[in-house]
Amino acid sequence: AEMMSTSTSREITTSSSTSKKLINAGVRSVVGKMVQTTWDTLLRHGYYVDEERKKHLGPLLEEFYESGLLGGRDASMPILLNAHFNPTYALSLYLHGTAGAGKSSLVRNIFPAINASIAAYADPELLVRFVKQNLNKPFQTLRLELDLRPNNNDYSVMSIIQGRRMTLTQSKPGLVLVALEEMPSDVTGADPNQSEVAKLLSMRFSGRKGEFKDGAAPRNSEKRGISGDATIITVFTSNYDLEPHCLEALQSLDMFKNLSVIKVAPVAGEDREAFALSYLKQ
């Protein structure tokens, strides 16, 4: 009897292990197709993603899509059969490079590509909305736009972002891609200045007012802030690299904890020829 019990236990363990492997393989297969759909949709919109960009963006999209399919569930559990996409991985990018490299074009075209991927493989009703905020303006103007207002007439950028998640035309809350464009340089005395902008975003998106402070946010700031919301995708663009202390200030927020700095170069040489051929073959 003891031998039969041990044998049965081994069979159950083996069966469970096999099931987990099959489920994991299934999730990875769907995620791979979602990433490929993203590249295909970008190309249909006229944006070519070369191998270098795929190398940097691919793994980040995989993390994001997988977290949305699992919705915080253990990877060994089956994918839910009902239409859903509930990401727990905060997708955040900082794209920098010379003017004309295709940074802003990528931002404009990637949100419909992400929407197409989710609609095809997860939830056809979920919508990805777009909000653009230019950061390269006088600091006082930027501060006024980001300031939180203690009433129902709050037209701050953060309030607009929250409103775009669920508009009157949507059947359920969706995702929002926030384009934070033209992050300035960190030149001392410049207006605006990268350090000041990074600190301002860190404070306002966490729901805090006043000047930049390290440490835990006040208890009631979570209700005003959006820092812990993985349904908000953030993409910075800039002609300048992100300074380490600015990255540190931003990564104090959950929404920027996965912030990946990627240098974008213009498509040239063989990649330019490959783009022309792939575009004509569509």
Image: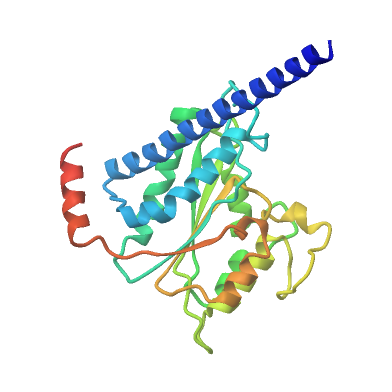
Q: Residue at x 47, y 31 (%)?
A: 30
Asked if residue 262 lies left or right of residue 194, the reply is left
**Image-quadrant location for residue 7:** top right
Q: How is the image coloured?
A: rainbow
Q: Most extreme residue toward the top, as rendered?
A: 1
**Image-quadrant location for residue 264:** bottom left
Asked if residue 161 lies left or right of residue 148, the reply is left
In which quadrant will I find the N terminus? top right
Q: Most extreme residue toward the bottom, as rendered?
A: 189
In this rendering, does residue 139 appear at all? Answer: no
**Image-quadrant location for residue 195:** bottom right
Whether residue 264 is situated above or below residue 25 in the rendered picture? below
In this rendering, does residue 93 appear at all? Answer: yes
In which quadrant will I find the C terminus? top left
Q: x, y (%) of residue 233?
A: 54, 51
Asked if residue 261 lies left or right of residue 80, the reply is left
Asked if residue 46 lies left or right of residue 3, the reply is left
Whether residue 254 is situated above or below residue 248 in the rendered picture? above
Task: From the viewer's side, name the closer residue of 95 and 30.
Answer: 30
Q: x, y (%) of residue 185?
A: 47, 79
Q: Residue at x 47, y 73 (%)?
A: 136
Q: x, y (%) of residue 139?
A: 56, 77
Q: x, y (%) of residue 66?
A: 55, 39
